[in-house]
Image: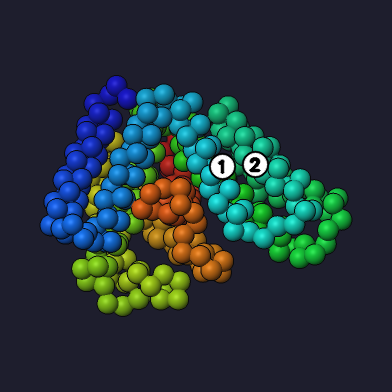
């Protein structure tokens, strides 16, 4: 955090937040005493972004321990939201306990000690086999396959996929030593800005729905404009990465596309559960999964893109 790219990056982010807060304050003043629900929601989202940026900044200052603890907590709250919307039975209690208090801490510990050979298969192989064994031992066979599949999905999304964000710290990239935290910043900025820019482009020019039954607000115009803008933004952030300008743009394009598809899948799950948001943890945004739905799909792809393209 003492190097110039990190200071310049966070300075720029704080500048954008100050500008957004000023715009929100002006819009609020113009709305008058009766206010506006849309502007109130906008200002709530800006306040939440202040909190999130401060938390990420503090975790970066703490280095590897701070980042791993931050994302382990994010996984915990995301998994809790997923399980809250998942019907469970008494026979699932042991497996649920194992998900929260064995699988989650072990996965992040393996990342802490940089044991790639195990943390890359711990959940999709060993936890996937262990969970149905625990449930079977309780003898409750009602909806057995459905219950197991839903718990496995929860582990994959909330723990396995999200844990690939702090795992970026462990990559050994020649000439980029000590700056891996900036890869996390690159990933988060591109994915989150893509979400915001898709919304803005959709509001300005959106006419044709991508998947109206899943997400009525997503349009092809918003998708193309948002991803193109996020790709350009990612290319312009090449200086905080080990990539060249075009490589940064291509990496941004991949993570923005995966982020969009992840948001679509998570919307499908919410529609299946009959809810609008995963929770109310983050003011103006909904739950932890509402904010991270695009990150969880982009993170593993970005991690392996860097690992197989830029590490020794």
User: Label 2 near label 1: C-beta < 8 Å?
Assistant: yes
At horizontal 35% and vertical 69% (from top left) the residue drawn is 218
CA separation in Å, label 1 and label 2: 7 Å
Task: Specify which label sits upstream in the sequence, 1 or 2.
Answer: 1
| Left or right placement of residue 6 versus residue 297 in this view | left
Rendering quarter of residue 211:
bottom left
- The chosen color scheme is rainbow
At horizontal 38% and vertical 49% (from top left) the residue drawn is 283
Number of marks in the rendered image? 2
**Is 172 in front, or is 256?**
256
Expressed as whole percent of the image width and height from the top left, the position of residue 36 reads 23, 61
At horizontal 80% and vertical 64% (from top left) the residue drawn is 142
> Tag 2's secondary structure?
helix
Q: Characterize the local packing of mark 1: few (<14), some (14-19) or many (20 or more) Cα atoms within 10 angstroms.
A: many
Find residue 277 and name its label.
none
Expressed as whole percent of the image width and height from the top left, the position of residue 258 reads 43, 57
Image height check: is 77 above or below 227?
Answer: above
Image height check: is 204 above or below 171?
Answer: below
At horizontal 68% and vertical 37% (from top left) the residue drawn is 102
Expressed as whole percent of the image width and height from the top left, the position of residue 122 reads 66, 41
Rendering quarter of residue 52:
top left
The residue to which callout 1 is attached is 76
> Tag 1's secondary structure?
helix
For the N terminus, the image quarter is top left
Q: Residue furthest front?
A: 33
**Is 277 in front, or is 185?**
277
Expressed as whole percent of the image width and height from the top left, the position of residue 75 reads 54, 43
Image height check: is 210 above or below 196?
Answer: below
Res. 125 in view = no
Find residue 100 and name its label.
2
**Is 303 in front, or is 310?**
303
């Amino acid at each position: 955090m003492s190097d110039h790219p990190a200071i310049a990056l966070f300075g720029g982010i704080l500048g954008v937040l100050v500008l957004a807060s000023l715009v929100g304050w002006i819009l609020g003043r113009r709305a008058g005493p009766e206010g506006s629900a849309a502007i109130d929601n906008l200002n709530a989202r800006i306040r939440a972004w202040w909190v999130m940026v401060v938390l990420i900044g503090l975790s970066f200052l703490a280095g590897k321990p701070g980042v791993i603890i931050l994302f382990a907590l994010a996984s915990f709250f995301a998994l809790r939201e997923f399980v809250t919307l998942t019907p469970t039975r008494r026979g699932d209690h042991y497996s649920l306990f194992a998900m929260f208090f064995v699988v989650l801490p072990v996965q992040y510990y393996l990342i802490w000690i940089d044991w790639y050979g195990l943390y890359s298969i711990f959940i999709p192989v060993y936890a996937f086999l262990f969970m149905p064994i625990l449930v079977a031992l309780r003898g409750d066979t009602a909806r057995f396959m459905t219950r197991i599949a839903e718990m496995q999905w929860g582990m994959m999304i909330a723990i396995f996929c999200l844990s690939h964000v702090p795992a970026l710290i462990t990559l050994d990239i020649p000439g980029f030593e000590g700056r891996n935290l900036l890869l996390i910043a690159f990933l988060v900025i591109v994915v989150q800005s893509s979400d915001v820019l898709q919304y803005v482009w959709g509001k300005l020019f959106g006419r044709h729905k991508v998947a109206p039954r899943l997400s009525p607000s997503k349009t092809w115009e918003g998708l193309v404009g948002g991803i193109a803008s996020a790709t350009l933004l990612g290319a312009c952030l090449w200086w905080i990465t080990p990539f060249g300008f075009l490589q940064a743009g291509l990496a941004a394009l991949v993570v923005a596309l995966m982020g969009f598809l992840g948001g679509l899948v998570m919307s499908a799950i919410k529609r299946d559960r009959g809810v609008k948001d995963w929770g109310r943890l983050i003011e103006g945004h909904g739950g932890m999964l509402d904010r991270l739905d695009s990150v969880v799909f982009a993170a593993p792809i970005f991690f392996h893109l860097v690992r197989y393209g830029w590490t020794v």
